[in-house]
């Protein structure tokens, strides 16, 4: 590449040098011619100066002669003046003399007249010669100035060219030095390339021997082990599962997603356009709120009201087509069955457009027939009617080509594979035509809306509706332009991806074979997934022994803990029984207490003396009922304490019988203390539950974060697997390219040697030419 660039550079420099040399020759000739012209003009100027001097001398002589004649005339006039008085005195005597004087006078007069005429003629010649001389002198001076200016310009051009030649010579010398350095480096690289080629030839020879041995081995295995060749017949080969191209599937899914977004925008724009058109019919040219609209517009509005049932399926069909393209499938025209559904939905929408087109044209004609319709508005309506016809025709053309693309998935002989590229190209042309039609509609409708807004009967509702229709048309134009450019950018990829299919065959023979191939692909993927199921890791022997010791120790401790739990459960059951027993005792004591209280009240009414006895009996009954647990206790003067559910009761001697009210206070205090204790335990339990709830909430957050990190790691793993597959593909391609480069290196080296020899010859010629130019410039 470097040698080719140098060769081209030197060719350009040689061409420029030859051009400059030719220009230099031309400029030399021009300078020589101008110098010759200037010399001739100088000689002419000298001749003119000489003739001018001669004329000036003649003029001077003539002026001197004229002065002499003038003096002579004056003398003659004086003599005449003197002779006249003398003649009067001697009239009689001087008749003869008068005759003589008259003759002399006539002679003088004639001579004077001749001299005057000659003087006048000389004056005229002198004036003409002077004017001619001045004119010639001015011309010669102007011509001399122009020639001097041109000579200066030529000299400047010559100086510039000499400078340029010197610069080019210096540049060529520098380039020569650089080229010599590059030639040396290229020679070194050529030597290295020779060594590399030798090594590559050795490697190629080894690879060739290895591949030939492998080929013989594989051919022997195929001949011995393979029962039949399923790639020989295209019908059988179509059932083979092709190599999975994940990058191709991801690219097709991405393209389908972009197409889905564009179709959604297009569907939205079409819905808005039809809906706002329906609203416009209701308010113009006749407002339905004031007067009834025509039956034609009523029918047109009814049809437009049904637009969603025809436009929405387009989006649904494209969505189903996008969902059918997954990473695990093989996406070609024979497997895209959902394209037929989208084509059917597009056909139904075109039927809808055909149905509303006559009503739309008649509605525009009705607007033109209105009294307020101007000529400009009528022209815009006619243009819009033509645009609507073009829009329907473009949709029909687009549906035709999409229907052709849907044929390979339903009818095997509907479309030949050789026509796929032309159909895709025509789809792109139809989309560009749709974009052009929408631009015309947007332009004409904006002009129409501007004219209608200037009408005196234009309402705010009409202006708003026109703005909405115009915005929907602009959105449709933008959507059509995006989808047209998108298809044009990807049409080459679509054409190239049509060959994706079984090897050594023309492709999928029929939709049935394609469906069978996809089923086989799913089975093969499931089988490979089952084979790639990881085995359970085995535990090393030493680790298993250590785990067994831990397990035995844990089982022993577990048995001890189980015994402790059993004992604690028995204790809890006994305590529960005692609790129930003492609760029953407390209820009985309460009943007895009520009976004794009733009895003491009755006795207090009868006599006051029996009160003390009743109180003593009551205290005795309470002590016996509450102290059955300590029945063997002796009555001593020291107080005895008994712990039970009722509380602590203090027994004293019989002489010191407690009072009823003090006993009730003790019971009340006990229960209050018990309530306080239970409330504190309840608060402690609540605080523990809040703490446990906070811990559970923190754990749930940590779990959510762990799930997110798990998803991120899964995505990273997916990206890493994609990069791995990409690197493997690049490795295979680099291997192939390296093998191709090895075969091309020898040819390239030969061509480099030839170019180096040519460059050396060119450098020598440039040296010679630069030396010759330098000598010529020095001589100049």
Image (spheres, rainbow, N blue to C red):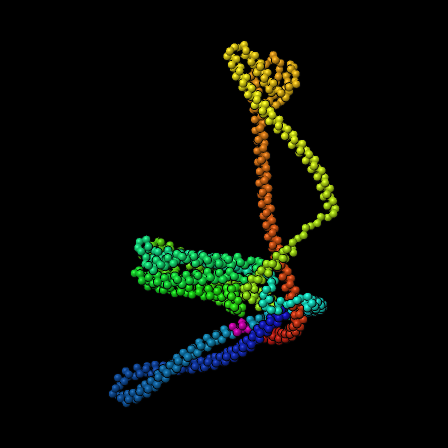
Residue lying furthest bottom: 96
Residue 355 pos. (x, y %): 39, 62
Q: Please name the residue shown 48% across and 57% down the image.
A: 316
Q: Nearer the viewer, residue 362 or 92?
A: 362
Residue 451 pos. (x, y %): 35, 60
Vertical order, 662 against 739 (above or below): above
Residue lying furthest left: 92
Q: Nearer the viewer, residue 288 or 662?
A: 662
Quadrant of the drawing holding the N terminus: bottom right
Residue 154 magenta-highlighted = yes
Q: Nearer the viewer, residue 47 or 574?
A: 574
Q: Please name the residue shown 58% across and 27% down the image.
A: 677
Q: Main secondary structure of the magenta part?
A: helix
Left or right of residue 610, residue 453 in this image: left
* Magenta residue span: 152-159
Vertical order, 584 against 686 (above or below): above
Residue 538 seen in the current view: yes
Residue 431 magenta-highlighted = no
Residue 211 seen in the current view: no
Q: Quadrant of residue 241?
A: bottom right
Q: Please name the residue shown 58% across and 67% down the image.
A: 235
């Amino acid at each position: 590449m470097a040698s080719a660039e140098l060769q081209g550079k030197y060719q350009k420099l040689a061409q420029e040098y030859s051009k400059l040399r030719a220009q230099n020759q031309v400029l030399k000739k021009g300078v020589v011619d101008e110098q010759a012209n200037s010399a001739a003009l100088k000689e002419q100027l000298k001749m003119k100066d000489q003739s001018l001097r001669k004329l000036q001398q003649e003029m001077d002589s003539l002026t001197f002669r004229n002065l002499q004649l003038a003096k002579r005339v004056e003398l003659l006039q004086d003599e005449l003046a003197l002779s006249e008085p003398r003649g009067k005195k001697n009239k009689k005597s001087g008749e003869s003399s008068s005759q003589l004087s008259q003759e002399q006078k006539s002679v003088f007069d004639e001579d004077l007249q001749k001299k005057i005429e000659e003087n006048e003629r000389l004056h005229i010649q002198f004036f003409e010669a002077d004017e001619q001389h001045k004119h010639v002198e001015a011309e010669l001076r102007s011509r001399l100035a122009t020639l001097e200016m041109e000579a200066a310009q030529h000299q400047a051009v010559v100086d510039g060219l000499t400078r340029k030649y010197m610069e080019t010579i210096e540049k060529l010398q520098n380039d020569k030095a650089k080229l010599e350095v590059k030639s040396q480096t290229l020679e070194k690289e050529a030597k290295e390339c020779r060594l590399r080629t030798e090594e590559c030839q050795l490697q190629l020879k080894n690879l060739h021997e290895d591949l030939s041995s492998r080929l013989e081995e594989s051919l022997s295995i195929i001949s011995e082990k393979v029962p039949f060749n399923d790639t020989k017949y295209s019908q059988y080969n179509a059932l083979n599962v092709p190599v999975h191209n994940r990058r191709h599937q991801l690219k097709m899914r991405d393209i389908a997603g972009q197409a889905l977004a564009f179709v959604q925008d297009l569907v939205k724009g079409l819905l808005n356009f039809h809906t706002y058109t329906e609203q416009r019919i209701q308010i113009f040219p006749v407002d339905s709120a004031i007067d009834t609209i025509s039956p034609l517009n009523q029918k047109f509005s009814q049809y437009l009201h049904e637009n969603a049932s025809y436009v929405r399926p387009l989006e649904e069909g494209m969505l189903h087509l996008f969902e059918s393209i997954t990473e695990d499938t093989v996406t070609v025209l024979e497997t895209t069955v959902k394209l037929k559904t989208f084509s059917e939905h597009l056909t139904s929408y075109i039927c809808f457009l055909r149905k509303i087109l006559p009503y739309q044209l008649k509605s525009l004609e009705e607007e033109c027939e209105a009294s307020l319709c101007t000529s400009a508005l009528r022209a815009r309506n006619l243009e819009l009617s033509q645009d609507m016809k073009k829009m329907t025709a473009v949709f029909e053309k687009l549906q035709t080509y999409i229907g052709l693309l849907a044929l390979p998935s339903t009818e095997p002989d509907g479309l030949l594979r050789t026509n796929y590229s032309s159909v895709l190209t025509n789809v792109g042309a139809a989309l560009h035509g749709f974009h052009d039609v929408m631009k015309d509609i947007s332009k004409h409708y904006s002009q129409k809306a501007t004219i209608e807004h200037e009408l005196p009967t234009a309402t705010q509702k009409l202006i708003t509706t026109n703005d909405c229709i115009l915005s929907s048309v602009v959105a449709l134009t933008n959507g059509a332009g995006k989808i047209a450019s998108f298809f044009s950018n990807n049409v080459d990829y679509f054409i190239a991806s049509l060959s994706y299919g079984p090897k050594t065959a023309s492709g999928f023979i029929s939709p049935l074979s394609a469906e069978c191939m996809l089923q086989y692909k799913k089975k093969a993927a499931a089988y490979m997934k089952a084979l790639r199921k990881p085995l359970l890791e085995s535990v090393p022997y030493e680790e298993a022994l250590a785990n067994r010791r831990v397990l035995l120790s844990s089982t022993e401790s577990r048995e001890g803990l189980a015994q402790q739990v059993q004992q604690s459960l028995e204790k809890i059951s006994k305590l529960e029984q005692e609790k129930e027993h003492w609760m029953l005792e407390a209820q009985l004591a309460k009943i007895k207490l009520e009976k004794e209280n009733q009895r003491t009240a009755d006795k207090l009414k009868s006599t006051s003396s029996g009160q003390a006895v009743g109180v003593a009996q009551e205290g005795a009954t309470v002590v016996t009922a509450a102290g059955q647990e300590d029945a063997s206790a002796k009555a001593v003067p020291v107080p005895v304490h008994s712990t039970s559910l009722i509380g602590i009761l203090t027994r004293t001697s019989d002489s010191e019988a407690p009072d009823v009210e003090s006993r009730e206070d003790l019971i009340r205090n006990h229960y209050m203390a018990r309530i306080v204790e239970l409330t504190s335990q309840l608060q402690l339990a609540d605080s523990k539950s809040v703490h446990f709830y906070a811990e559970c909430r923190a754990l749930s957050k940590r779990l959510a974060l762990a799930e997110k990190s798990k998803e991120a790691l899964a995505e990273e793993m997916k990206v890493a697997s994609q990069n791995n597959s990409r690197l493997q593909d690049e490795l295979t391609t680099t291997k192939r390219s390296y093998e191709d480069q090895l075969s091309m290196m020898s040819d390239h080296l030969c061509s480099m040697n030839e170019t180096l020899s040519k460059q050396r010859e060119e450098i020598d010629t440039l040296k010679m030419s630069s030396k010759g130019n330098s000598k010529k410039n020095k001589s100049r």
